[in-house]
Amino acid sequence: MKFLIIQENGRHLISRHLRECNSLQRALIFNGESCDVWGLGHVNFHNIPDYNQYDVIINLENYDTSGWVPDLTPTVRPMKLIWAIDSHCQGRDYYTAIFQRGRYHKILEATKYYVDHNRVWFPNCYDSDFMVPFSDISKNTFVGFCGNYVNRQATFEFIKSRVPDFKLDINVRGIDMVRAINSYYVHFNKNMSNDINYRNFETLGCGTFLLTSYDNQYAELGFKEGEHFYTYRSNEEAVEKLNYLRANPEIIGEISKKGHEFGLANHTFKKRAAELIQIIKHL
């Protein structure tokens, strides 16, 4: 099949290679498919594609504020899909309106709770070409967080008040992000809402222990508590589990290893691309 992915290129050069469109393109090619990427910020942006030459078009754009995303309504030959990564931020209606206006075939929905007759569950994942354990990085931080504050600041302040060596790497991107995650024994995560964010999978990819906020979707994704990761349901429980792990460091190593193997086998972009090909064949 011949794919076209439409998404704005990454705005931060250091992490552009990890933009979803670029990771999915590499994964589709790995699985034997042909794939082009086009959108604002890409070198080919001013060369408008012939949309009808493709078998599948994936609209992977989440934050179009200038109206550059094309109207695909007249495009009738390809199967047209939306990959909705941020429904937990934008809301279901935002993507439903795009779906209806552009006469798309399906929405690939990253959040299981929003799946309906127009949506197929297509969870987040990680790029196993880049999110890997680094042999030259020694783990020198017991627990850290690498990402953005968003709605997490109160949680971080609570954890920091009880775990003083909790390290925050805010707005660290690209290779520096991978190195930071590699340097933690435990990577602390708080999902923004009812999503399972990329940090979960990237942590496993780096071979670091994942401690994250609880959600029912983990079980459906195959995660096993105490085997692949730990979850917490309150800030107090998070601190309790951190204290337990500090006192039992051998558990960190055991679960980190199993978590890495689990993520590599089930939740990479290469795995998702293979699943996407099967989804398309059955639509």
Image: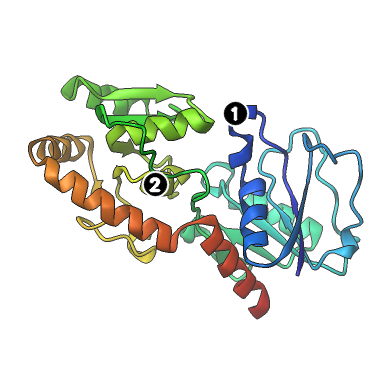
Answer above or below: position of 239 versus 74.
above
- Numbered circle sitting on residue 43: none
Q: Secondary structure at mark 2?
A: helix
| CB under 8 Å between discs 1 and 2 | no
Could you tell me which residue is drawn at 29 percent across and 31 percent down? 138
* Residue pictured at 61% horizontal, 75% vertical: 278
Residue 51 against residue 13 in the figure, above or below: below
Is residue 229 among the parts visible in the rendering?
Answer: no
Is residue 242 shown above or below 51?
A: above
Kindly identify which residue carries mark 2.
200
Name of the residue lying farthest toward the bottom = 282
- Which quarter of the figure has residue 141? top left
Q: Is residue 9 left or right of residue 45?
A: left
Camera-nearest residue between 68 and 257: 257
Q: Earlier in the sequence, mark 1 or mark 2?
A: 1
Residue 98 in the image: state x and y as whole percent.
73, 53
Q: CA distance from mark 1 to mark 2?
A: 21 Å
Which quarter of the figure has residue 57?
bottom right
Q: Secondary structure at mark 1?
A: helix
Residue 113 image offset from top left, x and y in percent: 47, 59
Q: Quadrant of the N terminus?
A: bottom right
Residue hosting label 1:
14
Residue located 18% across and 25% down the image: 163
Residue closest to the eye, 187 or 206: 206
Mark 1 Cα within 10 Å, few/some/many (few <14, many 20+)? Answer: some
Residue 101, percent from left and from top: 79, 56
Asked if residue 66 is positioned above or below residue 111 in the image, the reply reads above
Q: Amino acid at mark 2?
A: Asn
Q: Is residue 251 left or right of residue 61?
A: left
Could one spot residue 84 in this view of the protein? yes
Residue type at numbered disc 1? Ile
